[in-house]
Image: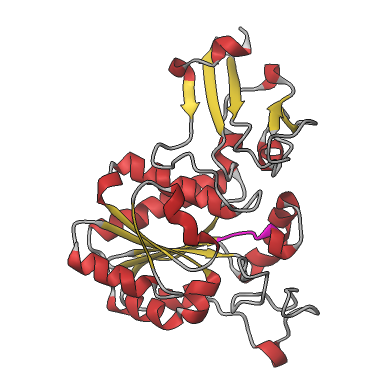
């Protein structure tokens, strides 16, 4: 079976911590961080990077277009 | 393979559309406006129409849409976006002209402009964001507010004897001969975002093929106005908005 690995990069300063990406992620990769960005928002971050499959669900539902998604086939 | 090895331009599958600039959006966290802005930017990029698109910004939260999408914009007086779009499209028929309006703009003060532009069959696309509330001015009741829904001007919930029935303007527009494509979508899940993108793309193509007026209603959330978290707003929308405003195509010629 072809394995797929993904990774997301969150634009921390653009993120408003709305949590929609966390809910949308089918692999529970994302969570809101404990630290905040300069505006005081707890930004989204990868907590289980190994589970990411690069499906881009988080990026599609992100209202602020702050997520960039990468994917490789192993 | 480490995360740093995966993060490489060759493996890119999704990034912020180039038509959308880096200005941080003023919308509240979790607002549906951002998703729809992003979809419009993606479609314009895919159609390669950045130099040929003229958007008409409304009055309401989306009034600053011109700050975020790098295309030509006009800003209309409250509710007058379809009238301004009529003028723009008639003077520049080779351009893609769309209006971007909320329910307070399109279904309240702009009802006449909307209905007449659609009835004349102007070759424009109308993107209608329906969150059942006046978001920008503080969550007042709009014509699309649901029966029983609380807002700052109906603190005990909207009642029919006092406030009348909610206005389903999209259904009304579908009856008119001038419209060619009328659909109702949402952007709360991955699947619905993809469907909405297809719908907006079709509306834009109809505008370029001079088929008539296309209306894409996006049933949206206003978590600040509804006093809920973005996540709870989506659930509330599915539970309460969808029975009153069912998703799907109302007209497709």
Toward which corner of the image does residue B207 lie, by quadrant?
Answer: bottom left
Quadrant location of the N terminus of chain B in the rendered image: top right
Q: Is residue B186 left or right of residue A30?
A: left
* Residue A9 in the image, given as x and y percentages of width and height: 59, 25
Viewer can see residue B224: yes
Q: Nearer the viewer, residue A74 or B154?
A: B154
Residue name at image x 35 percent, y 54 percent: B202
Which residues lie in the magenta part? B219-223
Residue name at image x 74 percent, y 80 percent: B154
Please say if A1 is above or below B40: above
Viewer can see residue B49: no
Residue name at image x 25 percent, y 71 percent: B87
Q: Nearer the viewer, residue B160 or B28?
A: B28
* Residue B194 in the image, given as x and y percentages of width and height: 50, 45
Is B35 colored magenta in this rendering? no
Q: Residue furthest front?
A: A38
Please say if B163 is above or below B152: below
The colour scheme of the drawn protein is: secondary structure
Residue name at image x 25 percent, y 66 percent: B88
Q: Is residue B124 left or right of residue A73?
A: left
Q: Nearer the viewer, residue A27 or B59?
A: B59
Please say if A27 is above or below B133: above
Q: Report the number of discs.
A: 0
Most common SS among magenta residues? loop
Q: Is residue B154 left or right of residue B177?
A: right
Quadrant location of the C terminus of chain B in the rendered image: bottom left
Q: Is residue B165 left or right of residue B100?
A: right
* Residue A69 in the image, given as x and y percentages of width and height: 54, 26
Q: Residue furthest bottom?
A: B161
């Amino acid at each position: 079976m072809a394995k797929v690995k993904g990774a997301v990069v969150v634009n921390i300063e653009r993120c408003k911590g709305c949590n929609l990406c966390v809910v949308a992620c089918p692999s529970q990769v994302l969570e809101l961080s404990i630290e905040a960005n300069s505006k005081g928002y707890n930004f989204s971050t990868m907590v289980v990077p190994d589970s990411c499959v690069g499906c881009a669900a988080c990026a599609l539902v992100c209202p602020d277009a702050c997520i960039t998604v990468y994917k490789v086939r192993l | 393979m480490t995360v740093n090895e995966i993060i490489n331009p060759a493996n890119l599958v999704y990034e912020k559309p180039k038509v959308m600039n880096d200005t941080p959006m003023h919308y509240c966290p979790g607002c549906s406006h951002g998703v729809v802005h992003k979809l419009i930017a993606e479609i314009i990029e895919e159609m390669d129409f950045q130099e040929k698109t003229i958007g008409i910004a409304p009055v309401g939260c989306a009034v600053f849409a011109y700050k975020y999408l790098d295309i030509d914009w006009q800003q209309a007086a409250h509710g007058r976006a379809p009238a301004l779009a009529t003028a723009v499209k008639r003077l520049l028929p080779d351009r893609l002209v769309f209006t971007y309006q909320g329910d307070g703009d399109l279904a309240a003060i702009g009802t006449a402009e909307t209905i007449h532009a659609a009835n004349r069959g102007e070759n424009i696309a109308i993107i209608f964001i329906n969150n059942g509330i006046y978001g920008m001015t503080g969550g007042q009741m709009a014509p699309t507010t649901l029966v029983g829904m609380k807002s700052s001007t109906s603190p005990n919930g909207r009642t029919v004897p006092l406030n009348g029935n909610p206005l389903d303007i999209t259904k009304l527009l579908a009856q008119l001969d001038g419209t060619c494509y009328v659909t109702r979508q949402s952007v709360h899940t991955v699947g619905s975002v993809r469907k909405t993108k297809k719908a907006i793309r079709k509306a834009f193509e109809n505008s370029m093929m001079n088929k008539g007026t296309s209306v894409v209603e996006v049933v949206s959330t206003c978590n600040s106005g509804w006093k809920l978290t973005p996540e709870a707003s989506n659930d509330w929308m599915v539970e309460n908005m969808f029975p009153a405003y069912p998703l799907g195509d109302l007209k497709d010629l």
